[in-house]
Amino acid sequence: MQLVKQILRLAIPSIATFSSMTFTGLLVLMIVGKLGASSIAVVGISNIIIYNLWALFSGVQGAINFLVAQNFGSSNIRLGNQRMQIALLVTAVQGIVLFSGSFVLPYVILLVMGSNDSILSLGAPYLQVRMLALIFTMFNTVFFAYMRAVGDTRTPMTISLINSGLVVALTYVMTYGAFGFPELGLQGAAWSMVAAEFITFMLSLLVYYRFMCGMYLTREWVPVEKQQVRLLLLESSKLGVTELSNSLGMLVFTACITRLGTTAIAANEIALNILSFGFMPSNGFGAAATIGIGQEIGKGRGAEARRFGIVTVYLGLIFMAMISVVFFLFSLPISKLYTSEAAVYTTAISLIHLAAFIQLFTGANIIFGGGLRGVGDTTFLSRTALLFNWVLFIPCTILLTRVYDLGQVGAWAALCMLIVLTAIAYTWRYLTLDWTNVKVKTGKSVAVSSAGHM
């Protein structure tokens, strides 16, 4: 029972954090939805592109999350702080690259994805501003990863809730010109993201350098060691490959649906937004698995780490099962929340049913994946993502939509296959690890061993 309480203490604030992000996406989509199906389509396509850009740089926050958790468990937070310093410097370089790319990439990306003239004219300036917001988002996720790694999941939750409130409020007033603000339309929704993420960034700086300094000495500069730079870059690259493989798979998935027309794009965005609701508990429990397992490994307790992950999966799947039932039973009223266009919400219903079907597999996928990150089994995660996305998901999506002309049904069949196979692979890997030999990642030698290579 004590373990369950520990897991819930870590998971529930994380669930609230991810929930705030998901609900924010829902509310923004509803606000923007009043501008028409083209605006919904632009937001949907841009979300996928932003996800891919985030995935390209996401390995840093993933690496900090499990590495600092291991350092915290082994009572070596000074090493964790050194790794955090390196992560912030790397993120700054990434931000410069993203800022430069924001002036040339948006139109080209949308054009390559096969967007029509309406989406190109609306989407290019919208995507450019969203890329600016992403720079602050990348810093925020690194700060959040450190906070969670030391067991503080409440502070990221609080800051995320503030961020969500800002995004929703600013999106409304800047889109429609309420309370004396200029009416900027879809561009107003984009600039609201920049403002909210910048304020969140300032809050994260305040927490990390001011409030966490007393306990964790976060303002103290730790001389950077080359082996730690190599370790962070290596782990970041492997986790980045994992996320980027998944996100590129979804980019191809979206590109195939983009060619089916505005109605199909809008219905797909609604269904994906609904599917993301299922990610809320699983992401929360996945984060708890990474933190708890990382800390237990830092303490040298492999058996306890394994048990922590198993119990976390059980708890997470209970939540996922309840969400699946709600999705299936209330698919029509849920889809009508997004749009009043009958063609869009009717198309979305069958996709929501599919989303409900795969929720348990999604939960196993994310939570066991979080556990493997806590161990530091990043090589397996990256190889699995590469194999399943590039050998199975992407070819099947193209084949079913473009060759066999199965439209959204074919695309979603390929997506379901990916989720199920990944869940099976992650479950097998977790259960067959040699937990008696797992060790902390030191950067100085091979630090983790198992039944296979990591």
Image: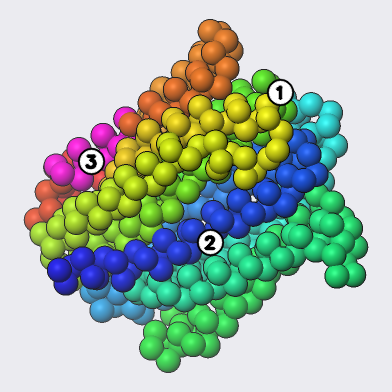
**Residue type at tag 1:** Gly
Give the residue number, with chain letter if any, for mark 1.
261
Q: Position of residue 104 (x, y in %)?
A: 79, 43
In the rendered structure, which segment of residues is drawn in magenta? 421-432
Left or right, 304 with respect to 222, comes to left
Residue 227 versus residue 92: which sits nearer the camera? 92
| Mark 2 closeness class: few <14, some 14–19, many ≥20 residues within 10 Å | many
Predominant SS of the magenta segment: helix
Give the residue number, with chain letter if any, for mark 2.
20
Left or right, 283 with respect to 292, comes to right
Q: Position of residue 75 (x, y in %)?
A: 26, 79
Give the numbered dot on residue 427.
3
**Residue type at tag 2:** Ser
Left or right, 130 with respect to 54, comes to right
Query: How far apart are the two marked residues, 2 and 3, measured between alpha carbons?
Result: 28 Å
Answer yes or no: is residue 2 visible: yes
- Figure quadrant of residue 44: top right
Query: How far apart are the two marked residues, 1 and 3, measured between alpha carbons?
Result: 38 Å
